[in-house]
Image (spheres, rainbow, N blue to C red):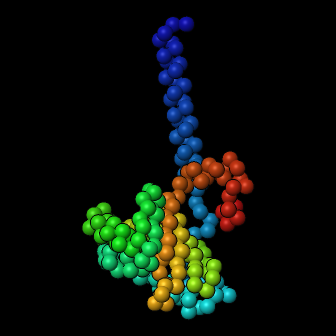
Amino acid sequence: MNRKLVKRAALVSALVLALAATGAYLYLDATSDVQRTGAETCGEVIPADADRRDGKAVCATLDALADAWERGDAEAYGRQFTENGTYTTYIGSHYEGRADITASHRALFKGFLKDSKLAARYLDMRFLTKDVAVLTSRGADYTGDKPGADELSKVTTFTLVRDTDDAWRIAAFHNTERSNVMERFSFLWAPDTAPKAEK
């Protein structure tokens, strides 16, 4: 077989594979909408069997966090965390303690998160004890138009505790970037991996 023919065949094969991969990616991306986008307000996910005052206090902490972010106020943002709180970002940065969380956000609010806001939809609130709550939400930071419920790119878990002054503060924060194409692929490949709310 002549070398030119082999090169052309390899080139055509590579092109066909690239087109197939692009088509598969576009299909997965187009069919990867989340079914459970969450509640618009935090108060909607307060459990029926919870103390409403505590549920509202947990929501007030999240509201204060978003307000501090919008104002670019790192000190107010940090005050929503316990003294020894932890903060893990979707890129894997792990901060320990209120001072560390505050310092990092001071830099972020002056840098690439300047003038940004937080969008959130609330998935679940559970009280593990009368002094410990876990809240899960979908969210994103943004500038310009607020993203729609189906455009929120992160899933966030807050573990809140009743602090020594009786205020609810965040003891642990974990943020995960949603990889919509990989999620859709895994649900197609192994359907039983899909959460009940996404089936």
Quarter of the view holding residue 46? bottom right
Q: In the image, what residue occupies the spot 54% across and 30% down?
A: 16
Left or right, residue 69 beside residue 128: left
Between residues 61 and 28, which one lies in front from this camera angle?
61
Image vertical order of residue 145 relative to residue 176, above or below = below
Rendered image quadrant of residue 65: bottom left
Asked whether residue 16 appears in the rendered view, the answer is yes
Is 155 drawn above or below residue 74 in the view shown? above
Q: Residue furthest top?
A: 1
* Furthest residue in direction left, as rendered: 110
Position of the N terminus by quadrant: top right
Count every numbered label the image shows and give the total: 0
| Residue under the image location 57 percent in, 50 percent down | 182
Query: As displayed, is residue 125 above or below residue 37?
Result: below
Residue 180 is situated, as x and y percent measured from the top left of the image, at: 55, 55
Q: Is residue 18 above or below residue 5?
A: below
Q: Residue furthest right?
A: 192
Look at 73% across and 55% down and name the residue there.
192
Which residue: 60% across, 75% down? 124
Instruction: Judge by depth and name the residue closer to the eye, 95 or 42.
Output: 95
Answer whether residue 65 is visible to the viewer in this image. no
Question: For residue 67, what is the image quadrant?
Answer: bottom left
Q: Position of residue 117 (x, y in %)?
A: 37, 72
Where is residue 110? Give x, y as percent.
26, 67
